[in-house]
Amino acid sequence: MDFEAASKTIGTCRTLNKYCKGIMARMLYVNSTMLVQGGSKRPSCLSSVEFGKMKKKLESSFPECPEAIKTPQFDLLASQFASQLQDVYDCFEEAACLKEGMFKVLKEVSGSGNGPFPTLKLDLTPTLITNFMELWLNYIKLHMIASRIEDRKSVLGFYFASASATHRRSDSSWNTVSNFFSASDEPIKHLYNEVNQNSLNNLKECVLQCLNEIVSTVHLYYNTNRFQEMNPLSIVSQGGESALPLFASTPISQRYPSVSLHFELSRSAMYSEWIAYSTLIMPSLTFNSAGLTELFGTIASELLFVDVFRGQALNIHAEMEKLSQFFPPKGMSLPILGKKKLKDYLKDLKKAVGTSSGIKQKRRRYYIIGELERLINIVQRVPGLLGPKFPIIFAALSLARNEVMCYWRHLGQSTGKKGQDSTQYDDQNISTLIGTADKLLGLVTRFTKIIRTYYAEFIKNSHRIAISNLISTIMVDLSDSERFNENMLNKILNLPFFLDFDLSLVEKENTKPLLQEFRWECDRLFGSLSNPMTGLHGGEADALLRRLSTARLHSKLVDSLPNLLGKCAELRDSYWYISALKQDLSTCLYGRDPNLGQYSISYLHVLLTSCNNIYPECPEEQTIVSHNCATSCEEMMGEICIRIDQILDLIVRDHLILNLATSPVEAFNRYERSIIASKARKGTVEAQVSAEEPLPGKESSGQTSEQILILSNYNLLISNLLLAFKSISRGKGIKNIAIIAHDRVIVPIEHISNVLESFFRNFLKKSIVLEDESRVSSPSKAIRMISTCVSVMQKSMEGSGVDVDKIIKLVLLDELSEWNRRSDKESLNAANTQRTILQWMVKYYVYLIKRISPNGDMPLGFVYVKARKSFASIPNGPKMAIQIESYISKCELVAFCSMLGGGGVRALNQELLALVAGRIKEVHQMLIHLTPSLIRFRDSKDSKDESNWHDALRSLYSLDKMFEHITAIGILVTVRSLLREALCSVSAKTMPGLHSTTQAACSMLNSALQNFGDNESVQISPEADLSSFESYAADLGLQISTDEDVGLLNAVHGLKLNPGPWDLLPI
């Protein structure tokens, strides 16, 4: 490879890698939508029963090019089939052509043709190593993805048969496509045979050299004991002696003192894939090297699966078992394994992974969680440390991402044939790992400006000067080299000028890639100098490459930090593990550890990162993935809110139980039950003895604290759930209070507010409306329960940012008053579907008064006690299902007024007055009907004829009915009087100033009305309209005149009855 071609090596590899990932995404999309059973775009030819035999024939004859199918029915549908399968075939053809191009570049870069073997060293050409090995891995993964495409052979057969029948294309591309997919049945074996050729020895040597460069990194990562002893993720121990840990930080090894340990650790998962995949395809490299054999054994004893692409995973042990069937070939020995056969070695690895891999993974995660929590605490206190300590933070975030992805790949998997040990990979701490990593990533996102500015200053003031000095030193050697033309020399000389940029541009938001051209020039130089024919190695030239490698890495922290974080720190594949993600969220919400709730919102952030994992080769995924992610986020937000609602309900329930248990009445009841139980044990009385109850006051001894501990656990859980809502900030503006999910904005505080409103509204109904909506709680009990619920809500939501008081007031206003804050149309719809608490209470009181009226179903068994101002049950009277004193007594009516206020009393009074008016109207109708008898009765009484009087008296046959109406009217008037007195006492206590002022005004008006015509007093005509003031005073339990009931008078006058019959009544 000449100098110019070598300079384009890294760019070519990077372009092919991006394109390969896009093609793999396209293939998976085509497979999920068009080829799998039930796919939304599945072609009819693949699902048709009529073409089932044809489909099997095409599959069996693959990879032979299918001949034109000559059947009348197929000829009619051939054009339709070709159109349906066109997109599928185009995708397959692109993948096959890409495979050919990637293989060609791999051979060119490795010098497998006539070119020289490139220089691959971690400190000199890290970019070349990374892009070359990524190309090698993507080449393998492309075959793996192809092997997982359903109906791939029948699709190709149907397409070419249809295309031939319609003469749409020739068979020129068949060989390329068919050769690629013919290898998909056994991709590992095909790649093994393809690569292990004598002409590809240079490719194998390049892979071997790259693997040897990363041995120390992978060994450190999987050696948990050494990893913890070294403690590379601690800010305190790493870089503490210098404010600039860019070069003072611990190197990866003594061999490469300039290679940062932390950035290498961030690539440990990628390096593990290099080892695993290379061993599968080039096993001779691994098992002929003691270091690589040990490293592969370390990886295979801890990992059951490695990543392929987007939720697709590869079982290392299953594939290695297949490999052992044809490797090693006859005549090849593996001295590294000694006398042990490869199959036995693999069995030992499988046994190891089945017994201890889950434990090892959990142990490493536990260490990472601890370091993440320390980093969060330090960064929150001193955000300025993000700049100099970012390599450590970046490594911690990358390792956390690697561990979460590893956990999802292994979740629910078994190492045995019968599903044994399928739970060994379950980890209760995964929510903590996801949450802490997300929280640290949120801090990095918020303070990105600090990181960019720090590295921009370092690049301009340190790297630029050092690179200029090194270039000046080696320019003599570069000028003498015949391989460097003048154009290339000028580019090298211009490298420092790329680093002389305006720092003010970095401080702006959405900074463009200022240093993109610098990185391109570095890549060209790395590719050129990787050619050993240049003769520029050692001394100052190597020092220049090392400095350029470091400067190139730091330049990405200036203008490409979001992309770098997205690739190495964000869980952008979470969408393809949505089931595991939701399962982890359930564990977070319902697990035993109450502290996990604080990480619940992190799951929304994690899932939304998948919206950025879209490739240009498959733009159709953007809408699907984004829409599904947004929908899932809303569902998860709803699940979090449901959990908060459940916990609030549990806390309120336990508080109510404790309040009841410690109330004086219950204490007396417990004392009585203990006496009865004691007598029952002695045999003096017959009673059913239940479990012995502690005496009142036993709670204070602290011996029965189980209920308190449960309540404390609930409080801790809801506190942590609310703490999660404080970690949503990802920037300024709306991102500070909301989560942007595709076309939706999720504001957690609004969701919580809606949950609290719904919870409180439902609690009011549950606590007041009882027994299938047949009765309501007594007002005193209801108000105690409401007070408890309000207290719990205020305490639980303290510091959450939710205006609980506002929510409570609005709900109470809606439910306990006639006023509503909705439009007339909404109010009408709500009235037709549900009843407010006020309406329930008024309805039940009316229902209760009707029942105790003379013509009700329980007119006996109660009496009105004037001294107590209460209706009371008669001790020896008939038993009633309802204790009347629990509703119509002084204390209960005071509670009724305290809860419903003047509006509730007004609503009940209106119903009572309607009943009074109805009774009066009934009496009036009876009098009209009895008018002749009443006249006769009056005349016989005046004539003093006893016989006539008795006959007239007997003609008044319905007097008993009239007395029932009069008794009922008396009950209604009495209840109204009790209500007014109760409301007056409540308003006097709750609104003393307003009550006293209104009372004084009533006295003045009453005096003015009584003294009308007296010139020395205030002149108010009795005909003056005082209805507004009377209504206002009635809401406070007051009235202008204490001698008359204005409301009752207005109700009677509103009947407009003929006064004639009333005059016939005896006086």
Image (tube, rainbow, N blue to C red):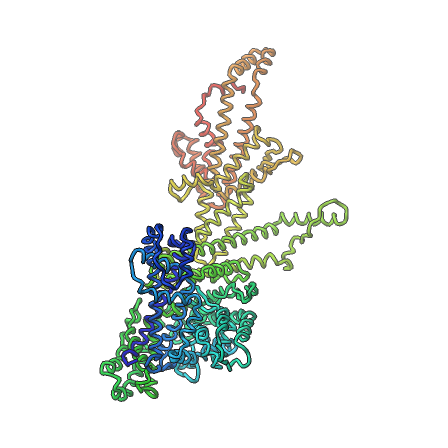
- Compared to 872, does 76 lie above or below? below
- Compared to 498, does 711 lie above or below? above
Q: Position of residue 267 (x, y in %)?
A: 42, 74
Q: Residue furthest right?
A: 683
Q: Residue at x 61, y 58 (%)?
A: 706
Residue 746 in view in this figure: no
Is 724 placed left or right of 778 in the picture? left
Is 385 placed left or right of 928 in the picture? left
- Compared to 122, does 598 lie above or below? above
- Compared to 678, does 338 lie above or below? below
Q: Residue furthest left?
A: 486
Q: Quadrant of residue 511?
A: bottom left
Q: Residue at x 32, y 82 (%)?
A: 531
Residue 906 in view in this figure: yes
The quadrant of the picture occupied by the C terminus is: top right
Q: Position of residue 464 (x, y in %)?
A: 30, 80
